[in-house]
Amino acid sequence: MSNCPSRIHLNKREMELQHDEQSLDLLSSEAHIWNHIYSFINSMSLKCAIQLQIPDIINRHGAPMLLSELVEALSIKNEKTQYVFRLMGMLVHSGFFVKQSISTTEDNDDEETKGYLLAPASRYLLTEEPLSSRSLVLAMLDPILMDPWQSLLGFSMKSRSLNSSSTNQWPMIQGLL
């Protein structure tokens, strides 16, 4: 009875479901790894926006700001517009800016387009904001603080113990101890 057609069909279906679950697990695992590999893009995009003073420029504009207006305010050549577009796309995706539909009238032709506005989080990136996080972002993403993380393997392979109260990990990471 164990070789009846319905039992064979059930085993085949169970195997297909198990294969589908394994495929989903593999895909999910790969996505998890990729998220870690590329997560620096969010931080570097935020740093770039602060260095270019994009939050301040959009705030001073006082209304949704078109990409062309932002590029002009940044004094960037028009050929570089695509890079500003990509940067702003990352920052919108990360929740620092929002895109809002606006109507413009040029040559008596109503054109529906999108402009950038500050999101609540970007208010903490403004120069004049008393609780601004600009300095913290720039300090934590400075190469002086980021570079030691590139040597984490060397740090973990050192024979010195981190349990010692006299051991400072940053000189050790930098190979000074």
Image: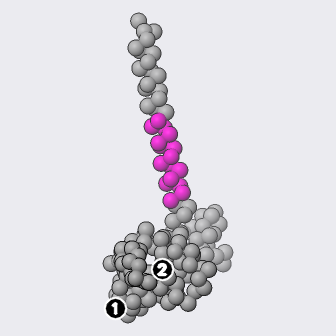
The residue under label 1 is which amino acid type?
Pro
* Rendered position, 11 above or below 22: above
Query: Could you tell which of marks 2 and 1 lies nearer the N-terminus?
Result: 2
What residue is rendered at 48% in x and 38% in y? 22
The residue under label 2 is which amino acid type?
Leu
Residue 102 seen in the current view? yes
**The disc label shown at residue 130, or none:** 1
Read off the magenta span: 20-35
Cα–Cα gap, marks 2 and 1 = 28 Å
Q: How is the image coloured?
A: one colour
Categorize mark 1 by other alpha carbons within 10 Å: few (<14), some (14-19), many (20+).
few
SS at mark 2?
A: helix
Question: Does the segment drawn in magenta span residue 114?
Answer: no
Rendered-image quadrant of the C terminus: bottom right
Left or right of residue 176: residue 56: left
User: For the residues carrying marks 2 and 1, which lies nearer the camera in this image?
Assistant: 2
**The disc label shown at residue 77, or none:** none
What residue is rendered at 53% in x and 55% in y? 33
Toward the top, the furthest residue is 1
The residue closer to the viewer here, 93 or 39, is 93
The residue closer to the viewer here, 154 or 52, is 52
Categorize mark 2 by other alpha carbons within 10 Å: few (<14), some (14-19), many (20+).
some
Q: Position of residue 137 (x, y in %)?
A: 47, 81
| Residue highlighted by disc 2 | 67
Question: Does the segment drawn in magenta span residue 27?
Answer: yes
Q: Position of residue 81 (x, y in %)?
A: 56, 78
What residue is rendered at 38% in x and 77% in y? 110
* Rendered position, 35 above or below 146: above
Q: Position of residue 109 (x, y in %)?
A: 41, 79
Dominant secondary-structure state across the stretch colored magenta:
helix
